[in-house]
C-alpha cells in the first residue's frame, strides 16, 4: 500500500477523504475551513499513513490553519458546508427511552 494523507472530522469520527499528496489534502482543508469558519478547524485533523500502516498526526486546529495559510488556494471542486446538528448525550437518551 502506498503512503497517503487523511483528513478526519474528529468531532464526528468521520474520514473526510484520503489524498496521495499533502498539497491536495491542505487545499481541501483550507476550503473546508473557509466554507465552515475557523472554528471548524478544531474538528479537522490531518494525518499521514506510511506504507507499513504507521499513522502520524500532522496537525489539528490552529496548527492546521497555519499550514493551510501557506498553500496556494485553488478550488479543485466545490465543498459543501458541514451540516451541524445538536450533539446528544447517549446516556441521557438511553435513560429517557
Image (cartoon, grey):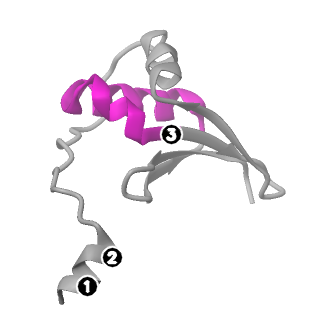
Residue 45 — which label? 3
Say whether marks 3 and 2 touch (CB < 8 Å): no
Outermost front residue: 95
Taking depth in this image into account, of 21 and 49 the one nearest to the observer is 49
Assess whether residue 32 is covered by the magenta stretch: yes
Q: Position of residue 43 (x, y in %)?
A: 39, 41
Outermost bottom residue: 97
What span is in magenta?
21-45
Q: Secondary structure at mark 2?
A: helix
| Quarter of the image that includes the N terminus | bottom right
- Residue 66 lies, with reference to residue 79, above or below; the image says above
Q: If you read the primary sequence from the N terminus, does the residue marked by circle 1 or circle 3 appear first?
A: 3
Q: Position of residue 36 (x, y in %)?
A: 21, 33
Q: Position of residue 52 (x, y in %)?
A: 84, 57
Visible residue check, residue 75: no
| Quarter of the image that includes the C terminus | bottom left
Outermost right residue: 52
Say whether marks 2 and 1 touch (CB < 8 Å): yes
Per the image, the residue denoted by label 2 is 91
Amino acid at each position: 500500500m502506498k503512503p497517503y494523507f487523511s483528513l478526519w472530522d474528529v468531532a464526528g469520527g468521520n474520514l473526510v477523504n484520503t489524498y496521495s499528496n499533502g498539497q491536495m489534502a491542505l487545499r481541501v482543508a483550507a476550503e473546508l475551513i473557509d466554507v465552515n469558519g475557523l472554528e471548524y478547524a478544531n474538528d479537522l485533523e490531518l494525518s499521514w499513513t506510511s506504507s507499513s500502516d504507521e499513522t502520524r498526526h500532522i496537525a489539528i486546529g490552529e496548527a492546521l490553519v497555519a499550514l493551510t495559510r501557506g498553500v496556494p488556494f485553488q478550488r479543485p471542486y466545490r465543498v459543501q458546508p458541514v451540516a451541524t446538528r445538536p450533539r446528544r448525550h447517549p446516556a441521557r437518551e438511553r435513560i429517557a427511552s
